Structures are given as C-alpha cells and as structure tokens.
Amino acid sequence: MAEASRSRKYRVVHYVNQFFGGVGGEEKANIEPFTIQGPQGPGRLLEKLFREEKADVDIVATVVCGDSYFADHQETVLRDLIPVIRGYDPDLVVAGPAFNAGRYGMACGAICRSLEPLGTPAITAMYKENPGLDQYRKTVLIVESSNTVSGMEDAARKMVRLGIKRLRGEEIESPKTEGCFEQGIRKNYFHEEPAYRRAIDMLLRKINEDPFQTEYPIPFFDRVEPRPALPDLKGVTIALVTSGGIVPTGNPDHIESSSASKYGKYPLDGLETLESKTHQSAHGGYDNTYANEDPNRVLPIDMMRTLEKELGFKPHRYYYATVGNGTSVDNAKKFAKEIAVELIRDGVQAVILTST
Amino acid sequence: MAKEIERAGIPVAHVCSIITISQTVGANRIVPAIAIPHPLGNPRLPPEEEKELRRNLLKKALAALQTPIEEQTVFS
C-alpha cells in the first residue's frame, strides 16, 4: 500500500512572476495572469529535483502574473486564479522561490494562504527579510531561501524535500529540520529528560558562557507608539522622504537601483515642481516610465507647493531619497536614524514618506 | 524607515502602494496610494484630474498627521 502510494504520479502547479515566467523584467511587471502548460524556468529545475528524489512529479502548469499587477489587484487576481489553479487538480502547489523580491513574496504568500484552507497543499520560499514572510508565516509553510537568485538550487532542493513530504502526507518535522520558518505552532512531545534537568543544564551552560538554545523563543514585536498628532499645520515644517528613488537627473550620488547602500539629500529651494528634465527615478523595482515622465507622481513637490500656500505649512528645504528595492532592514534603519537626526536638528515636525 | 523616523520622535504619514508591507514594517499612519509605478498620480487621467488626485492624496496625508491615533491606522 505504502509502495503503491509512493509510485503514484503527482500533479504540481507552479506559480511564478513575470521574470521567472520568461516574460520580462520590471517593464512587464504589470502583466495580467496567464497560464503555461508544463514547467517553465525554475519549474524545470523543480521537476528535475523531484524526480531525482524519486517522486514521480509532473509540473502540469505554470501560472504567471506580473508582480505589480498582483499587488495592485490582489483580490481579483486571487478570485480568478485560485479556481484556475484548482482546475488542474494539483496534489501540491509550489510558489516561487521569491528570494528578497517584496511584491513577489507577498504574491506567493497570498496564493498559498488561499489554497491551504481549500485542501490544496501549497509551499513557497523566500528570504528572511522579504515582507511576505511576516505577513504569511503563520498560515503558510515558507522555506528559507537566500536573498538573491544565486541561491536558486539550494532553495529548490529544500522546497522539493518539503514538497515530497506534503505530497505523501508525511509528518512535517521541526522548522529547523525542514529548513523553513517557524509558524508559531507549539507541538507537545515527550522529552527523554525531565524539564528540571534541562533547565538546570541550560542554566549551567549560561553561567559557563557556553552556547545554549532556548526551548521557547519569546516572540519579539518591534512597534513604535504613534506620535501625537499635529495640532495645527500653520507654520509647521514638513519634510518629504521617499523610498521611490526620485533623484536629480544623472543620480549624482549613484544610489543603487536595488539593495541600496545609501540615501541622498537634495535641495527643494526655488523648486515649484519636479520635471523630467531635472529629476528621475533611480529605482530598479518598478517600471520608471511614469515617474520619469512626471516625478511628482512619486514625490509630490507640485502639490506640496500649492498646499503650502493654502494651508500655511512650510515644506522642508531638502528632501531625502533612497531606493527601497531589496534594501536590507539594517540599511533602511540606519538611513532613517541618520535622516531623523538631521530633521530634528533642522526643526522638522512631521514627515510624509512616499513609497512605490 | 517610517518606523525609525517615528521612533526618533517625528510623526510620519506613509503614503504607499502596498499597505500590507507598510503594516508589516510598522508604519503608524498609513495612506493608501494609487499604484506602484505612480503612487501619487495616474497617467491615464487628464493632467488636471491627475493633479486633483495628487492634491487629495496629499491632503489625506496631512489630515492623517493631524489625527490622534492609538494604534496603526489606515486612512483610506
């Protein structure tokens, strides 16, 4: 019986974005969902690895959607795509790996979360700083991947191992063993050592400054209390900050189009609006056509000026910009801390931060 | 960035296209924008209407900064 179920053929549907679907890069991120019969891109690697592990898997279809299109139309995309995916009668759905691509990670998480309650097992993979992780880790099994596509093979192998367990209905072991992120599920089991002994062992290790591992990590939620509201706008200095990569033409500080290691500070004195001649987008994570055409679409200087006159606040003399595209959390924190020090020194009382 | 600037003591209105990301990273005053490649604009609208749209979004962000809140709030 076990042998029979092992030799059965499994049907897998794979979800990828426009890039891995072979459509194109950022300029195609607005593409509507479509389906390809059979594997495509990383799906071929997945299929090969499944078979290497002696699982008779066919990737029957690859579902592709542009990252921006998904993010902008999540509800309708899910409403349309979930029945399409289920129409292939899959034993498992694999999404990604998404690495550190934020929109892609969010899409992979959303697809898996929608499928699981319908009885279709679904797994994905992403980097630990992908925003899709915190959003979906509790409801979706997410394999840990590297932050860039260079870790494709490693991520695919881990996904395949986990995927086979789900196909065969085998028990999923601890997140560490499986190479996935913790879901916050506590499982009871009988330990051979009683708790008092483990506690004393751990305490001794701690006293001796030996490495030890807690049995129950305390979850850490980093939240900041909302600051009080501004009582009045009159005379208040408000600064604009953007992660949308709007910089003076030519990108004088050479802010990287992804994984930015710096930010820029640029003057607004005498500027009534931003123009395509003077400013541009340096962001590599979205199609820059519209932002280059009219940079106010990302950094609204024209309307800041109009509202300045109407409402009596003062736009700060400089704006700050970086590229929020796979930028590490540590870098973003560092930028913001430095920016905040300057803003406070310069008497800025509020910030409008725009993100693409 | 929104969270760290706020931590330093300055209220932030985060105008952003993907609200769930903003919620995850811990912004407190969140204003949903139009779309990823043009958060404060819409190239499909005639110029005057597009400006009006941008003006309204910015006014919403300013209103958010003037609204006392106790927890993460989306100003949609």
Image (spheres, coloured by chain):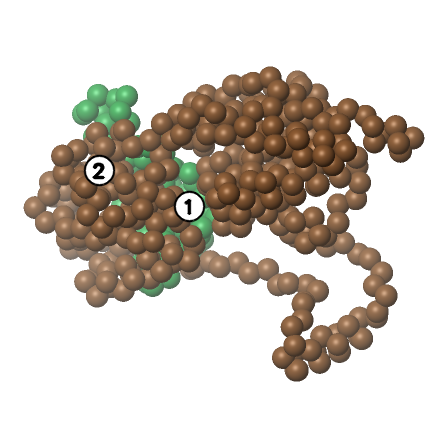
Residue depicted at x 46% and y 29%: A19
Residue depicted at x 42% and y 26%: A24
Q: Amino acid at mark 1?
A: Gly
- Give whichever of A290, A346 is nearer the camera: A290
In the picture, the disc for residue A205 is none
- Give whichever of B64, A347 is nearer the camera: A347
Q: Mark 2, chain letter?
A: A
In the picture, the disc for residue A280 is 2
Q: Quadrant of the C terminus of chain A?
A: top left
Q: Is residue A136 left or right of residue A334?
A: right
In the picture, the disc for residue A326 is 1
Residue depicted at x 10% and y 43%: A271
Residue A80 position, x and y percent, is: 55, 20
Callouts 2 and 1 close, C-beta under 8 Å: no
Residue depicted at x 75% and y 45%: A172
Report which colour depicts chain A: brown
The chain in green: B
Q: Is residue A268 left or right of residue A157?
A: left
- Give whichever of A227, A202 is nearer the camera: A202
